[in-house]
Amino acid sequence: MGLIALLTDFGMRDGYVASMKAVIQSIAPESKVIDISHDISPQNIEEAGFVLWTAYRYFPRKTIFACVIDPGVGTKRNLIAVKTRDYLFLAPDNGLLDMVLSELEIKRSVRVMREKYFLKNVSNTFHGRDIIAPIASHMMKGVKLKSFGPSITIEKPKTPFQQVSIKGAYNGLIIYIDRFGNLVSNFKMNKPRKAELVIGNYRIPLQKAYGDAKKGEPLALVGSTGLVEIAVRDGSAKDLLHALYKTPVTLNVK
Amino acid sequence: MGLIALLTDFGMRDGYVASMKAVIQSIAPESKVIDISHDISPQNIEEAGFVLWTAYRYFPRKTIFACVIDPGVGTKRNLIAVKTRDYLFLAPDNGLLDMVLSELEIKRSVRVMREKYFLKNVSNTFHGRDIIAPIASHMMKGVKLKSFGPSITIEKPKTPFQQVSIKGAYNGLIIYIDRFGNLVSNFKMNKPRKAELVIGNYRIPLQKAYGDAKKGEPLALVGSTGLVEIAVRDGSAKDLLHALYKTPVTLNVK
Amino acid sequence: MGLIALLTDFGMRDGYVASMKAVIQSIAPESKVIDISHDISPQNIEEAGFVLWTAYRYFPRKTIFACVIDPGVGTKRNLIAVKTRDYLFLAPDNGLLDMVLSELEIKRSVRVMREKYFLKNVSNTFHGRDIIAPIASHMMKGVKLKSFGPSITIEKPKTPFQQVSIKGAYNGLIIYIDRFGNLVSNFKMNKPRKAELVIGNYRIPLQKAYGDAKKGEPLALVGSTGLVEIAVRDGSAKDLLHALYKTPVTLNVK
């Protein structure tokens, strides 16, 4: 039983995700579906790209990632399927896969066009159900990538991260804000170092765990994805610091 | 492995849905459960009926739909089970199934009464867990409809849709507002035609895809369910037009 | 195919839950995962304990409950695994399991320490993914509890409930507020009795079902967990009565 991982901005109220799952079960009933997230902010491609990046590496080999944040649905934008060593990715060609592909070697990629693998009636507004779900299901059943359309060349995207290793001052930005109000920066740190993160008027020392700060106080730490993030013990850094997506931050490594 | 599709207004915070799934796995561990939605507005039967209608047709044959929007739980309202050519539906007898049944032929329907198939202790407030989940599980295991209670006759509900085919002015209303703020009308259009939708002071031309409008501008289009809907490119029609459920709309077909 | 039931405060937006499920599918692909809730208020251990308590008894034997409400992650708090007659529970040692364990006999309990069963790189902020998900998966594959760490002794927690049987006045409090705004008290009543619940200036008679009150009126009733709760017909008791978690209530049993 193989896995299909779904990532959309459909929410769970409207039945759109259910329609995709229903299509998958109709075509490939043996597949197991895992929801990555359906609560991506409407049409927020960067947010979706980040969430995919945090989760994909934990999935077993051969997982098919079907991603539908698709403001261009019904226009001439392309749908692409990308094969890497371990995974298959399926998404609109709008940058959603950039963060993931910046760190993977692309084995093959195609533009998804072969209508034979679509639902019979394709709407202009819901390709998640009419194209992406059936294509993912046919992939699950073993149809080869090249059957879905012509090969294309995808240039390897630039990494959005800054590797922090030697001492100095690094300029970066907040690239994600999670449910707890933690502010995730684009500073990547493999081993924790003595450092201080500057955001607005705050100078925040890097510590080891949430519990190392006092209640209500901000702290910086290397989060679960290897990125430096700002948290507030038993609180929300987003609320305390009034930070937004793309707020600039500086990291002083000592 | 058969499918049980769940539709409730329980939300996902409280553990009510989990209790239903736990009951299903206890009685029919081979079944696969798909969530249609659990975020129906509390006790909003029409909303649930619409969401079910948009999704059900994509499910594989023999899917069992277990629906619990049940303001009358614990009173004398009936629970009904309805068999159509392809599906089984289980719900309170409160109109939830009307939209679906308006377009399906009913093969058999019963009033669900046989306590032998309920949980041992039936509460007065949670028949989803105590009756509907176990009944769906026994259906999954092959128990015939007639075992659950006496046959009843259900009159075929009237369609809530207006088929739009020839030119003229049609009066209708908004019957659903989705997560993106798209306003779905009850105008059904099989093939896109030249038309204009009037709502309040707005006259909105019918177009093909979301991308055919400028950013922030409203457009009308035939949505993924074949109904005419109003959207705003990269925005929310609900917020722009201040429209509510049941707002009247007129469609001028040219 | 065994069940792993997940309970977290991660929400479904960020991909944290997906990472846990991905780890589980990588180690124990035959397992079936059921979400109890991921919308527990951030770091609200009591709320999580209550939700677990309402749902756990409906799960089939041998279900593994993996619970991650973990404000102390990365500090010296322990992770514990507890075996009862029917179930396995895995959680931080922060009181989350108290309500459940107050009514179960503990067969064995260990402190989870054996790094061999963790992911290779354990972060300081996400033990749900790096420790709890892999431990649950190894449990699913049959690894014995004692392999995960040294035995510990857990004192049986005191029950938070008040059994209401003979007539008199009982003092209690609101211990949970659900999605519908129902206020759940800690009064346990096996058989409905003539009674009146007092909250603020309201004296609310105990009735049988939601439908026994007029629209917009509050009523008390024995809810689906055997606890007395306050509801408002077609409305929200929380909004009408301005009640909060831990609001005191009195039950006069006649």
Image: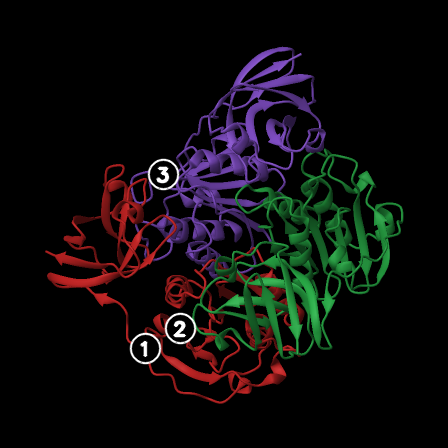
Chain colours: A green, B purple, C red
Taking depth in this image into account, of A110 and B213 the one nearest to the observer is B213
CA gap between label 3 and label 2 equals: 38 Å
Query: Which of the labelled discs sits on residue B78, or is there none?
Result: 3
Which residue in the structure is indicated by mark 2? C97
Vertical placement of residue A127 versus B172, above or below:
below
Which residue in the structure is indicated by mark 1? C157
User: Is circle 1 on the same chain as circle 2?
Assistant: yes
Vertical placement of residue B80 versus C94, above or below:
above
Residue B145 x %, y %: 47, 43
Report whether C214 appears left or right of A181.
left
Taking depth in this image into account, of B170 and C165 the one nearest to the observer is B170
Three-letter code for the amino acid on which mark 2 is drawn: Leu
Quadrant of res B209: top right
Tag 3 subunit: B
Taking depth in this image into account, of B194 and A128 the one nearest to the observer is B194
Q: Secondary structure at mark 1?
A: loop
Q: Residue at x 29, y 54 (%)?
A: C183
CA gap between label 1 and label 3 equals: 42 Å
Please report contact status of discs 1 and 2: CB closer than 8 Å, yes or no: yes
Q: Residues within 10 Å of mark 1 (few under 14, many from 20)?
A: some
CA gap between label 1 and label 2 equals: 9 Å
Three-letter code for the amino acid on which mark 1 is drawn: Pro
Three-letter code for the amino acid on which mark 3 is drawn: Asn
Q: Residues within 10 Å of mark 3 (few under 14, many from 20)?
A: some
Q: Residue at x 28, y 72 (%)?
A: C159
Residue B149 x %, y %: 39, 42
Vertical placement of residue C211 versus A230, above or below:
above
